[in-house]
Amino acid sequence: MVELAQLIHQDCERELEPAKKQIATLFEGLGSVMGRVKDPVSAGNRLQRAQDRFGATVTNPEQAKSNLWDAVGTRLVLSDTSPAGMNETAARIADGIRSGKLDMFEFNNLHGPGGKPYFTPEHIQMMRQAAAEAGKPLRVNESKLMDTGYTVACGYLNHGNGVKGELQIIGPRTLELANAEHIPYDVSLGKPLVRDVPKAAEANIQSLVAPIENAMSGMSDVQKARYNQYLNQSYIHARNEELGVPSTPPRLPPGLSEDLSAENITRVQKALYDIKAQYKS
């Protein structure tokens, strides 16, 4: 699957800048826009899951493009996640769908148990109505529960050349936690954390992530469930901070390694970013 992902990587790279420009134009003034192309190892992992979990057939580049729904990733980091800010964001999405400037085929509103999603049922209905007016089907999961509490809105888009992409919409505090939570998430999927980096950086990165990998490898099913509950409470706390609601950070459950705390995985994530940025420069 990694070999197939490598074959389509250049096509995906060509769509990145147009996708970022498209999102920046549609949501001008609402926040900052980021973008990335999924690396071949991660893309291969996703294609394998599409085949194993959903029965997809992935034997050639076109099938790989069709089943790699987040090949190009764009992210809108909102500067205002208040009700007024989300009203404006939802209106922009609806306008983009209606006008054809946003070729969206699916929308997921993710959050954890008891968490606060970014979009309300009224916002979702606005998007459904826009899709109906445009005559294009839009699959919607308006309140998808995530065990870890992962909180984000995801729109799935058709870009050029058969490439698909994921548009994430998120606030800054929740993004910080989501970036950090990707470390234990990747470990849980069996994805190598040391990948797509210069050889000289591998030992440094491995020393940072090894304690997290070791802590997760020794967890029982009960401990994993408790850790997910802790992460969910951490996302609720992050959303409260974005909304200006008084909130206290949750405590890591007894028996879990401090290496898995939100504070530590955030520290490690920032250190990894700094190392990778150093080598890119």
Image (spheres, helix red, strand yellow):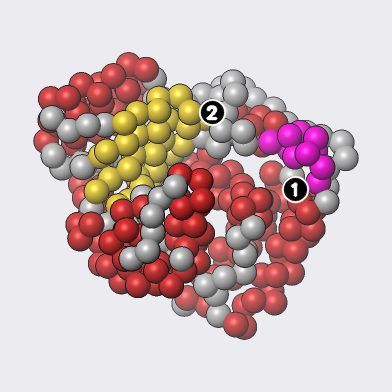
Labels 2 and 1: the sequence-earlier one = 2
Residue 42, x across and y down, in percent: 50, 61
Residue 179, x across and y down, in percent: 55, 50
How many marks on residues? Answer: 2
Disc 1 marks which residue? Answer: 260
User: Label 1 is placed on what type of residue?
Assistant: Leu
Q: Is residue 264 above or below residue 123?
A: below
Left or right: 91 in relation to 205:
left
User: Label 2 is placed on what type of residue?
Assistant: Leu
Q: Is residue 198 above or below residue 122?
A: below
Q: Is residue 171 magenta?
A: no
- In the rendering, which numbered label is found on residue 145? 2
Residue 55, x across and y down, in percent: 44, 47
Residue at 55% across / 37% down in the picture?
Answer: 150
Residue at 69% across / 27% down in the picture?
Answer: 248
Q: Secondary structure at mark 2?
A: strand
Q: 150 or 9: which is nearer to us?
A: 9
Left or right: 173 in relation to 79:
right
Q: Quadrant of residue 206?
A: bottom right
Residue segment shown in magenta = 219-228
SS assignment for the magenta stretch, majority: helix
Outermost residue on the top side: it is 122
Residue 62, x across and y down, in percent: 28, 61
